Amino acid sequence: MCWRPCSWRGTWENTGPDPEAGAAAEDPVEVTRAHVEAFQAWMIETRSASTALNKHKGLQQFFKWLMLDEGEIVRSPMERVRQPKLPQKPVPVIRDEETSNLAVSLGYGGC
């Protein structure tokens, strides 16, 4: 049975952090926690934190499926791998003066 999604091999083999992780690229059953942590660290360094978090969640679901639905693995390599933290981005706030200028320019008079 071919259960490997096409994107798995491409994700791990072509863009992964460890060119020596050939077995993991060929067969997801060979993936270890160390592979996942190295991949996640590499994603954080080379992509946005948001992208790294999305990849983490995708891998989490993939290995859950591989374990529970397919029975190919006994334990997920994602166990105890923490999600990447997203930095908080401050939301810009419009100042009172800017609000008044906007109101005037729209013809609502001064506030």
Image (tube, rainbow, N blue to C red):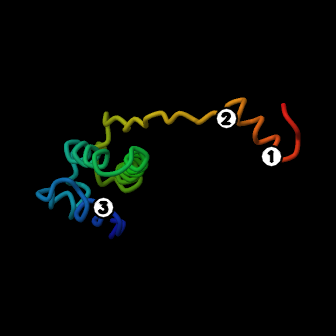
Residue 37's quadrant in the figure? top left
Nearest to the observer: residue 108 or residue 91: 108
Alpha-carbon distance for marks 3 and 2? 42 Å
Residue 47 x %, y %: 34, 51
Residue 45 x %, y %: 28, 46
Asked if marks 3 and 2 touch (Cβ < 8 Å), the reply is: no
Where, quadrant-wise, is the C terminus in this rendering?
top right
Q: Which mark is residue 39?
A: none
Q: Amino acid at mark 3?
A: Thr
Q: Amino acid at mark 1?
A: Ser
Q: Which mark is residue 105?
A: 1
Alpha-carbon distance for marks 1 and 3? 51 Å
Nearest to the observer: residue 77 or residue 75: 77
Secondary element at tag 3: helix
Alpha-carbon distance for marks 2 and 1? 15 Å
Earlier-in-chain disc, 3 versus 2: 3
> Could you tell me which residue is drawn at 21 percent across and 47 percent down?
35
Left or right position of 80 against 20: right
Crowding near pointer 2: few (<14 within 10 Å), some, many (20+)?
few
Crowding near pointer 1: few (<14 within 10 Å), some, many (20+)?
few
Q: Which residue is mark 2?
A: 94
Q: Amino acid at mark 2?
A: Ile
Q: Which residue is mark 3?
A: 11
Earlier-in-chain disc, 1 versus 3: 3
Secondary element at tag 1: helix
Relative to residue 9, is residue 91 depicted above or below?
A: above
Residue 69 x %, y %: 41, 54
